[in-house]
Image (cartoon, helix red, strand yellow):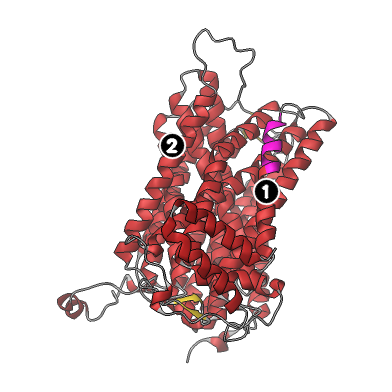
Amino acid sequence: MFDRKYVVFVVALVAWAAVFYFMDKSIMQAQGLPVGADMMPK
Amino acid sequence: MKTSHIIAFAAASAAVLLPELAAASGDVVAAVDEAIAGAPELARSAYPSIAGISARTLAWSMAQMHLFLAAFVLAVPLFAIATEFMSVITKDDRFDNMAREFMKITMAAYSLTALVGGGLLLSLLVFYPHLMGYLISVFRGQMLIYAALFGLESITLYVYFYSWDALRRGNRKYYHMSIGLLLNTVGLTLMFVANAWASFMMSPAGIDPDGAITGTVWEATRNPLWNPLNLHRFLANIAYGGAIVGGYAAYMFLAEKDPVKKAHYDWMGYTSNFIAIVGFIPLPFAGYWLMAEIYAYSQQMGITAMGGILAWLFIIQAVLIGTIMLAANYYLWSGLMRTDRGAQYTKYVKYIAVVIVGGFLVWVTPHTLILTTAEIQNLGGTHHKILGPLGIMPAKNTAVNLMLVFTFLSFQMFYRSSRVPTVSWAKSGNMVIVALYVIGIANIIGAGIYGYITPTVYKVGASVPQVVSTLMIILGSVFIDVFMLRGAKSEKIHWGRMTERSQYALFVLPVAFTWLMGLMGYIRSSLRTNWHVYTVMKDNSPENYIPTLGDAGNTITGITLAFMAIMVFVFWLSRLGVTKQKGTNTDTGATS
């Protein structure tokens, strides 16, 4: 079986990814920059 | 007594020594009275010409030298008191001795700071009397407050240093630290006041478009660029002070033969390098804020800085910052040999080196190349098709953030090399930290790539999550480490077990910092172009143009070399103070 530390690593990766995603989103929105695909240059 | 009379007195005092200056003292008095109605409009003849001296180069050199010395003597007491506080918390006298030694170097430099400051004042009064008159009319009594603060700074500095042994134990220690706190409060206030004058010249406030005073001194002080400049200089001073005392520690390490003293200076060098890095890590973000505020205040001024001829200096800035990063990291990697467990981390050094050097190369890549016509034709333009994208800000922001993250990693490796965690969840804790690094770095790179595919406003906006990611990695790792290393098994650190080669990295830091500060000072001042006070008071002197990069480079290098010579003298003086002639009775001698 996997060492428990790898399970912790995967869980931590997911958790940190969520933290950074919401952080990015809130920072961009706080600057008045909507987050979404429509901001890409046409 | 009117302010103008005091200035006239100062100028007249100078005239006793140099009769040619007598006319200038009269100009200052007249300028103060005229300036109330608006900024003076000067003819070229209003600028004194004395013995063929280049007024701008003289004032520039004096101002820059004063700033170098002042930055140093203001910063060192800040971390001296922090180190002294550490001695109280840890009850370890080594911290106390080191704090006192920090202050000893400051004392040797303090009188030189005042001397050069006096030289700066005189050169401004003599060569730019109308400008000084106008600034005095705007800031009025604040200039006297500055003089009073300077007196208070001198008193508190001397009392703080000379009472060290008299107020060393028990409650007296708190009296001593209170004096130190007062010293730092006065020192910082001095800096903030001086910053108000410099930033007013860039972004004037409290006056109408003709320069007539409409607001209070506080309104002129709190101009748009004041606080960004305050923060930037505060952090830069910490980093600079740390770098210089690191240079002192390296000098002493190389000079000492006694292993105990060598160990002491090795520890001092490590602590100084740590202080320099702590001040340096948030510095690019403070610089970014300052530049954003410059753009917000005047887009023209921002473009002069980042889009015109001065933009090339940011490439030189990148070279110098890259040098600082490489030197600081090299020193940290060398430090791994101080511990027996350090060797297990050396295998990671090469990967960190790749990131630091890679980031350095990205940072020095210019957006537009200087090319001959034939080269432009061969390339199909001034942008290189592969390297060109590395010239814009998303790439450079990504590079600098990664360099900072990996510099912190170098420090963390050294810190970990002397501590073995004993908590049961140590492996899991390490995994959480590794995951934080992985996701944080991915976020920095992702935000950088995002900058390429979005309009400019998003490019600028995406730099903020990059900064926050860097800070999150650093603070998150420290937070987890604090709990994970509680009760950790400490490994012996063999202070003094360092190569002599590594000490030269500590010499590189103050030289690169000094050069960098001179360079950035030239940029900041040049942003005013041909204005004494931007858009309000025109500079009509014969030298009212931005100096060429070559001329500026020579002047800045000259000032840097002069400052380094002064520092070597200060280090030598500090060492001389503890050197005793053989056979001398040591009972009456002061110790370091």
Chain identity of mark 1 = B
Which residue is under mark 2? Answer: B568
Residue in the image at 42% along x and 48% along y: B326
Specify the amino acid type for callout 2.
Val
Determine the CA span between mark 2 and mark 1. 27 Å
Residue B589 on the magenta span: no
Relative to B165, residue B334 above or below = below
Q: Give the x, y percent position of residue B92.
A: 71, 28
Which residue is under mark 1? Answer: B151
Quadrant in which the N terminus of chain B is drawn: bottom right
Q: Give yes or no for contact between labels 2 and 1 (Cβ–Cβ under 8 Å).
A: no
**Between disc 2 and disc 1, whose residue precedes?**
1
Relative to B387, residue B589 above or below = above
Q: Is residue B589 visible?
A: yes
Residue in the image at 40% along x and 55% along y: B320
Helix, strand or loop at label 2? It is helix
Q: Which residues are magenta?
A: B155-164
Residue in the image at 51% along x and 70% along y: B27
